[in-house]
Amino acid sequence: MNDVNRRVLPGFRLSLGYTLAYLGVLVLVPLAACFSKAATLPFDRFWAAVSTERAIAAYELTVGASLVSAAINVVLGVLVAWVLVRYEFPLKRLVDSLVDLPFALPTAVAGLVYSSLYVESGWLGRFLVPLGIQAAYSRLAIVLVLVFVGFPFVVRTLEPVLERIDADIEEAAACLGATRLQTVTRVIFPSLYPALVTGFALSFARALGEYGSVVFVSGNMPYKTEIAPVLIVARLEEFAYAEATAIAVVLLVISFSVLVVVNLLERWSKRVYA
Amino acid sequence: MSTPEKTNPRSDPRWVRVALIAAALGVIGVLIVIPLVDVFVEAFGRGLGAYWQTLTGDADTQAAIRLTLTVAPIALALNLIFGIAAAWAISRFRFPGRTLLTALIDLPFSVSPVVAGLIFVLIFGLQGYLGPWLRAHDWRIIFATPGLVLATTFVTFPFIARELIPLMEAIGADEEIAAASLGASGWQLFRRVTLPNIKWGLVYGIILCNARAMGEFGAVYVVSGHITGRTDTMPLRVEKLFQEYNTPGAFAVASLLASLALVTLAVKTALEWKTRRDLAEAARLRSEGDAA
């Protein structure tokens, strides 16, 4: 295909050249600038900037809230994907397309509406606040919007896998005397693991960098409800560019590591579960 | 096989089905439907007249709408050209580093929007690498429209390319090779063969890219400088109105963005159904062809 295409089809150099130039100018050079700016800081100043108590509290909250929200999304995602693939009910198609709303709804809108729903006078807050559940301006609020933002990932990675499971396998399990529960937990779930890992990681990665929705609902209190991206913005607004960049580098390294781990896990699970 | 409904090993007991469906609908209801309805209830709560007045009576809100309608199309056009070029290069040719290039295209998705804004401040901002040079020539990028375009383009960078690459790989190059052998020029080949084949995938990528471009918050927040009436896009305007305790104003602008999201979802769903129908149709024709 290689040689034939290049001889017959036009535009190889043009399209590849344009792609590389555009990618370089818009993505690679700016990202490199971020790392090179951080590198101009002497190491002790870099370390001082990224390891302040406030910064460490922010990383812990960012990673912690992202992990919790991704875990919740796995549970909710399994439930919703299972129902959408296996059962019939009225308005199913509408429900199915609503799953994607978090992808289409601007994060600022999500933040605005979640902040108004869970305050004491809000539609949901009026039931929750009397029970002592503060789901606005708290860590719970952060987890809640992150669940919203990452919700479609697990559902959408799981659905095609569920659709592809052979009826034969389940029938075989039933014929061999497995109860329905055994079939589901021992036969169906194991074949979902790779998709679950992917969905979890996508949802986690999205949550790590999320800013727009969190800034509305969290209250942004240093040490308590301040996530790393909010801290970067706070440093920028103090014109502390070097410190902001140092924290940004930490965040970038965390996100890129997640990306690498996801790729490795996907490769590994393809080998093991294929 | 006497009573297939009862013994079908794939069907769950009725109470399990009902309970799971109820739970799933509850999740979607609380997580998605209630917030969506709430946006419109809050926006229209004081009547249609007040809503209209909130949107049209505020010059800064008007400016924000105009700015979003300027920035998003430019970012979209830039990424559209890139997406087509990247998909052509990656799906039609084999070259060293092809897998790496495909992976690099996805890179902006794993960069926090705030960091995406920051990297452009580091280059074009006053203290940035090109800052002094830009100031000498009296050019403004950060805290001005070009910065908003750059940041928006960065965060929406992968959308169209990602949609087109697998699609064009699935379609294959046979038709294009035939056209080229018959003497079609590059442009004819693209317009008459490639474009008709990829048009629905292209529309799909464009609407997703557009939704993100119009709704982007974090990246533009960092580069905008929040100059009311000049560098506030619609999502930034929502935040500013919210900070000023102008909740009706914030929800009015938010309702426009939520409507955009609904239109995006509707087009997306329609396209997905169409693709599924087309695939089923193609499979049917193929099996009929085999039978004949």
Image (spheres, helix red, strand yellow):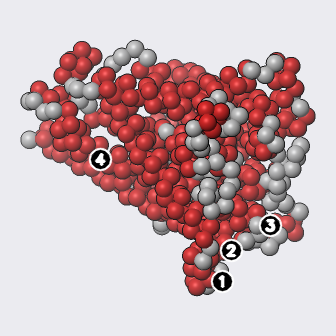
Q: Which residue is mark 3?
A: A119
**Could you tell me which secondary element the residue under label 1 belongs to?**
loop
Q: Between disc 1 and disc 2, whose residue precedes?
A: 1
Q: Secondary structure at mark 4?
A: helix
Give the residue type at disc 1: Arg
Which quarter of the rendering shows the N terminus of chain A?
Answer: top left
Q: Residue at x 78, y 45 (%)?
A: A237
Marks 2 and 4, Cα distance to the nearest angstrom?
Answer: 40 Å
Same-chain status of marks 3 and 4: no
Residue A56 located left or right of residue B24: right
Judge the density around disc 2: few (<14), some (14-19), many (≥20) Cα neighbours within 10 Å. Answer: many
Q: Of discs 3 and 4, which sits in the foreground?
A: 4
Labelled pair 1, 2 in contact (Cβ < 8 Å): yes
**Residue under numbered circle 2:** B248
- Mark 3–mark 2 CB contact (< 8 Å): no
| Image quadrant assignment for residue A182 | top right
N-term mark: 2 or 4: 4
Residue to which mark 4 is pinned: B199
* Amino acid type, label 3: Val
